[in-house]
Amino acid sequence: MNADPRRPAPTLDFLTTKKDELIGWARKFSLFPYPFVTACCAMEFMSVSSTLYDTDRFGAALPRFSPRQSDLLMVVGTVNHKQAPILRKIYEQMCEPKWVIAFGVCATSGGFYQNYAAVAGIDRIIPVDVFIPGCPPRPEMVIDGIMKLQDKIAGSKHPIVNERF
Ligand code: SF4
């Protein structure tokens, strides 16, 4: 009961905000990447996953090779039109919430493959959260991209099925 009629009644906004912050914090440190690797950027993906750069610091070190066990699709390398439906299907098989990183300039825009076979950016096929340019990108750029994705996850709303708040 609201004792002072001049003050607005308390709402549950506070609890909802704190719930989103808590889930966002947990999710941003438990990313399970699915590497969709097609070309030479794979070398840099392996480099950034190694001990020296240690993506475990960001909770993103353990690749899953099943889309149903992944929440981060990392598209690494050139994607051609023949592969486009496969990439789309893998994205659709991932459970929500899910995020996508375009790793390297080929995945971002087609790179220098301006021809009939290459897709000029994977955002023509699936939604992309973070674009990392470079041919190939430096490991520091990849880590910067992961941190940007973490910021995005932390700042997002995280609805829960049958939410009671
Ligand atoms: S961005 Fe460069 S290194 Fe990466 S797949 Fe394309 S050509 Fe290869």
Image: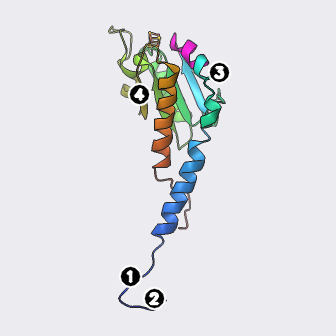
Residue 118: where, in percent of width, then height?
A: 39, 12
| Ligand 1 position by quadrant | top left
Q: Is residue 121 magenta?
A: no
Span highlighted in magenta in the image? 38-46
Residue 82: where, in percent of width, then height?
A: 45, 14
Residue under numbered circle 3: 50
Residue 72: where, in percent of width, then height?
A: 55, 34
Residue under numbered circle 2: 2
Q: Is residue 85 left or right of residue 55?
A: left
Residue under numbered circle 4: 131
| CA–CA distance in space, label 2 to label 4 | 50 Å
Q: Which element type, helix, strand or loop, lies under badge 4?
A: strand
Q: Which amino acid, mark 1?
A: Pro
- Mark earlier in primary sequence (3, 1): 1
Residue under numbered circle 1: 8
Asked if the residue under mark 2 is in contact with the one under mark 3, i.e. CB atoms within 8 Å, the reply is no
Asked if the residue under mark 1 is in contact with the one under mark 2, i.e. CB atoms within 8 Å, the reply is yes
